[in-house]
Image (cartoon, grey):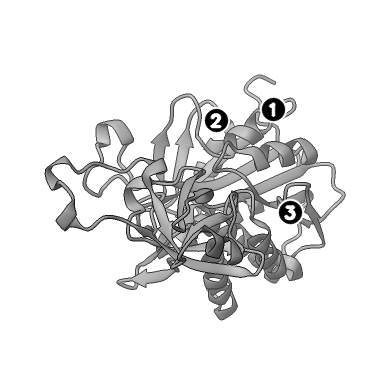
Amino acid sequence: MTEQSTEFLYKYLNNASPTGFESPGQQIWLDYIKPYIQEQIIDTYGTAVGVVNPGQDYKVVIEAHSDEIAWFVNYINDDGYIYVRRNGGSDAAIAPSMRVNLHTPNGPVQGVFGWPAIHVREVAKDRVPKPHELFIDVGAANKSEVEQMGIHVGTVITFADGLTEMNNRYYVGRALDNRVGGFMIAEVARLLHENEVQFPFTLYVVNAVQEEIGLRGAEMISRRLKPDLAIVTDVTHDTQSPMYTKTKQGDLKCGLGPVLCYGPAVQNNFRDHIISVANEKEIPFQRQAVSRSTGTDTDSFAYSAEGVASALISLPLKYMHTTVETVHKDDVQNVIKLMYETLLSLKGGEDYRYIK
């Protein structure tokens, strides 16, 4: 990984990009990939697309999503305490005592999720708080002072934790789900450009919005681009840490490589092609089975228009939807390598239908 790549990783991951408010992160992402693309597309809701080799009949997508879970201001009481509601799958269990940024037109306002001290709680009756019980303290004396800070109902809130490294092996931080995916597809674009790769198809490098509230960005952009193939990357659960049940969640581990998914939305022949690439290039990988859906943007691409041959390459991750999401550096590089080598293997006219 280059020094420029590392700088981009930290800048992009440390930026706030809550669902529905992704534009600052999308600008950082676009600024990084501009030297590696010929055109760009930005749709109505902010999905950003870098276009490589435009104008070809055959069209391929590599995709990640750019949004992170967050909170909204829902109510401000007379004493200046702020009550919230979820924006995406935010976890009420981890919120108490967390530092937050409330994003106003004048910049972020710092606050904390407060919580009663252990001394005044009936500890034996402790339970996970409900979202409507959570409150934020921004140091204001009353509601008027909160409003003077530029905070109002609808102001979006993110946790304040930034990206760090652990034991020289792991990246740790909030919003690795899934801005680390945006980093990985950007790195694929960089490698293609620097290695002067020529291919007989148009490549769309897609960083979609609003995945966390229903795969909405991918749904919109897939209808617009109408690709022939889609390779989606997202995170999936490392199941080795305590409180996971492998008989339910499978046996996946950070550091053992990308995860290839089996499920109805994944086109089997295309997935098997990716497996053959992994074997040929000696890229380690793991396998995962899903039920009705993948729960990722793969579903939106697979079922758009007349159907798009789609595959999912997942990155194992610990502690999803917390501020200490954790991924292995080797897995990040191997996801990049697998996407890159898969693109090199394509001839530009693949037909992965079952019956021809």
The residue drawn where x is 70% and y is 32% is 351
The residue drawn where x is 52% and y is 56% is 157
As drawn, 290 above or below 348: above
What amino acid is labelled 3 in the image?
Val
**Mark sitting on residue 307:** 1
The residue drawn where x is 58% and y is 44% is 232
Badge 3 marks a residue whose secondary structure is strand
The mark closer to the camera, 3 or 1, is 3
Quarter of the image with the C terminus in it? top right
79 left or right of 21?
left
Tell me if residue 303 can be seen.
Answer: yes
Toward the left, the furthest residue is 124
Toward the top, the furthest residue is 355
- Residue 8 position, x and y percent, is 58, 72
**Mark sitting on residue 49:** 3
The mark closer to the camera, 2 or 3, is 3
Q: Residues within 10 Å of mark 1 (few under 14, many from 20)?
A: some
The residue drawn where x is 63% and y is 62% is 25
Tell me which corner region of the image, top left, top right, bottom left or bottom right, holds residue 127. Answer: top left
Tell me if residue 318 can be seen.
Answer: no
271 or 213, nearer to the observer: 213
Q: Which residue is mark 2?
A: 268
